[in-house]
Amino acid sequence: MQARHQDMTDEQLMQAYGQGDAVAFDALYARHEAALFRFVRRVLGQAFSAQADEVFQDCWLRVVNHRASYSADAGKWKTWAYTIAHNLALDRLRTSGRELSVDTDEAQSGSERLEWLQTSMDMHHSSAEDTAFWRAAGRQLLQCLEGLPAAQRAVFLQHHEDGATVEELARALDAGFETVKSRLRYALQKLRGCMQGYLQGWGAT
């Protein structure tokens, strides 16, 4: 990988690849390989984790096939690529008779996963109990996420975990801004309600 590629944005790398720079693709792949695979695996869920490799490769094949037509004007490359990955994984679940799922193994990263919850609910908890508390809360959140409608769950994951803005999601999903905003609002309301009783049981204030 050439040094100059390390300083390029995702969008610049993709555009360079579209113009024939194969090293730019290598840089883009190396930058996002691990995170994109985790995202695919989480969407598929543990029951379908064996298919994660195939869906992951299908996603990158789509990226390759669209190298000439990609335009940075459509938004961030990451949002574009993660939307492709999400749609492929969701299609796989639908053909298998399953809806969007979340891998319970991801509960081990509960402290990072629930940062949004601490902020939105103004929560505090004693440091001595933090590790056990957040791991347990992470598992509870996964159960609450399973109870959301698929459309709300999808935009919540992409917005709060993968950093996509409402505007980017609206463009990527070909949905109205207010539609995406409403899905996020309803998802957060339901998650707050689902988590509130659990968190109060731990003495959260």
Image: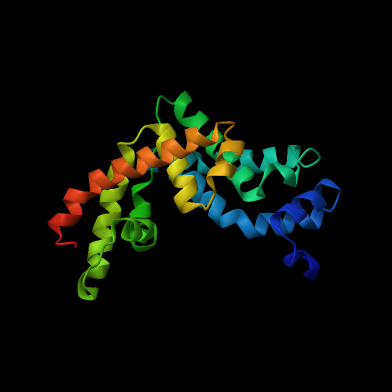
Q: Is 72 placed left or right of 171 in the picture?
A: right
Q: Residue at x 26, y 56 (%)?
A: 137
Task: Name the quadrant of the C terminus.
Answer: bottom left
Decide: is 7 above or below 179. below
Task: Name the quadrant of the N terminus.
Answer: bottom right
Residue 121 visible: yes
Q: Is 51 placed left or right of 196 in the picture?
A: right
Residue 165 is situated, as x and y percent measured from the top left of the image, at: 54, 48
Decide: is 103 above or below 7. above
Along the line of sight, the residue nearer the viewer: 131 or 179: 179
Along the line of sight, the residue nearer the viewer: 31 or 53: 31
Q: Quadrant of residue 49?
A: top left
Q: Is 56 placed left or right of 130 in the picture?
A: right
Decide: is 155 above or below 30. above
Colour scheme in the image? rainbow
Q: Most extreme residue toward the right, as rendered?
A: 20
Along the line of sight, the residue nearer the viewer: 164 or 113: 164
Residue 32 is situated, as x and y percent measured from the top left of the image, at: 61, 55
Along the line of sight, the residue nearer the viewer: 187 or 51: 187
Q: Most extreme residue toward the front, as rendered?
A: 178
Q: How many marks?
A: 0
Q: Residue at x 30, y 49 (%)?
A: 141
Residue 25 is situated, as x and y percent measured from the top left of the image, at: 75, 53
Residue 112 is situated, as x and y percent measured from the top left of the image, at: 39, 62
Q: Residue at x 79, y 37 (%)?
A: 69
Q: Is 65 placed left or right of 179 in the picture?
A: right
Q: Residue at x 35, y 60 (%)?
A: 119
Residue 44 visible: no
Q: Most extreme residue toward the bottom, as rendered?
A: 128
Q: Quadrant of residue 28?
A: bottom right
